[in-house]
Image (spheres, grey):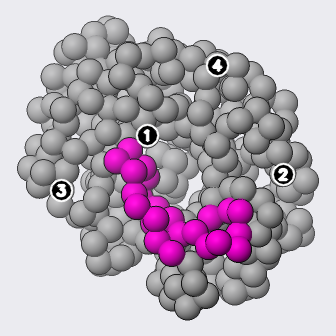
Amino acid sequence: MLIDNYGRRFYYLRLSVTDACNFRCSYCLPDGYSAGDDSLQLSSAEAATVVRAFASLGTQKVRLTGGEPSLRSDLPEIIAASKATPGIRRVAVTSNGYKLPRVVDGWHAAGLDQLNISIDSLDPAEFAELTGHDCLPRVLQGIARAQQLGIEVKVNAVLLQDGSRRRLREFLSWIREMPVTVRFIELMRTGENKAYFASNHLRGQVIEHQLLEDGWQLLPRARDAGPAREYRHPAYRGRIGLITPYGEDFCNSCNRLRISAQGRLHLCLFADHGIDLYREISRGDSRALAEKIQRAIGEKPLQHHLDQGQVGAMRNLSQLGG
């Protein structure tokens, strides 16, 4: 079992399979993706080695992230290998949904359990402005198909200052009859979005106070769940989640570790550097890899320092999938 120096147990792996993305989201890659000098990405076999190592240490859930995971044609192979790993109970993918109607059946056949789709606005024009792609109907079509297949679907929406109350009303209207969880995520400062963050950041407590006033109730948090606090209301089929990294106790319940597409272990999303594990990964030696991860866990910090403007090596959220 992976336990750090503060008694936190880690059941959840976020594995980035690429840092490339085909969207140009205003808060992440407004000028589009540009490949850096370090463009290596783990092969499907190498990704399977990572999952085996973490599973041997008690990991039960794997989320495949990016960038945009659907840009990899071998993603079904990675899903299937992860699902077939002893000890792994749930496999999830985070995606922008651009290709979803074409690929979701294959992901389901490979064993996918859960999808998180990024939709920052239900207004088609605003969606296009925020992402650089006029494709909201296609994304919603993909979500409908995923639900038909029995895949659990959650929607991620970044909280932005301007128009936040209007977007909340639109999402609340949508989930009155739509059985999905919409998770509002506080905009996070990165190395490249300092000015954007300063003018657009909104604390999640603003939304939380309104939900509580309107009768929404906090749900218990599952052991392998992500960082969201989820709320339900008897008048709605869907739920609301809040991810508030600037909250005082956010890091206390951390249960997840991250591997980059280059094979680096990131003990925190905003760490100053990753720990290079590629030699062990490339050899297919999951036992040696597990031993190195076990030794490294003692270096995990108690908390990040986002509130002090310290973002570590995080240039943009495409690097590690947030």
Depth check, mark 1 against mark 2: the one in front is 2
Circles 3 and 1: CB distance less than 8 Å?
no
User: Marks 1 and 2, how far apart in space?
Assistant: 25 Å
Observer able to see residue 213: yes
User: Marks 3 and 1, how far apart in space?
Assistant: 18 Å
- Look at label 1 and name its amino acid: Arg
- The span picked out in magenta is 217-239
Mark 4: which secondary structure? helix
Numbered label attached to residue 14: 1
Q: Is residue 170 magenta?
A: no
Mark 2: which secondary structure? helix
Circles 2 and 3: CB distance less than 8 Å?
no
Q: Which residue is mark 4?
A: 110
- Look at label 3 and name its amino acid: Pro
Mark 1: which secondary structure? strand
Depth check, mark 4 against mark 1: the one in front is 4
| Label whose residue precedes the other's in the sequence (2 or 3) | 2
Vertical placement of residue 283 versus 33, above or below: above
Q: Which residue is mark 2?
A: 140
Q: Choose between 228 and 45: the one closer to the eye.
A: 228
Residue 142 x, y percent position in the rendering: 82, 42
Identified at 19% across, 50% down, the residue is 8
Identified at 56% across, 78% down, the residue is 216
User: Marks 2 and 3, how far apart in space?
Assistant: 39 Å
Q: Which residue is mark 3?
A: 301
- Look at label 2 and name its amino acid: Leu
User: Marks 4 and 1, how far apart in space?
Assistant: 18 Å
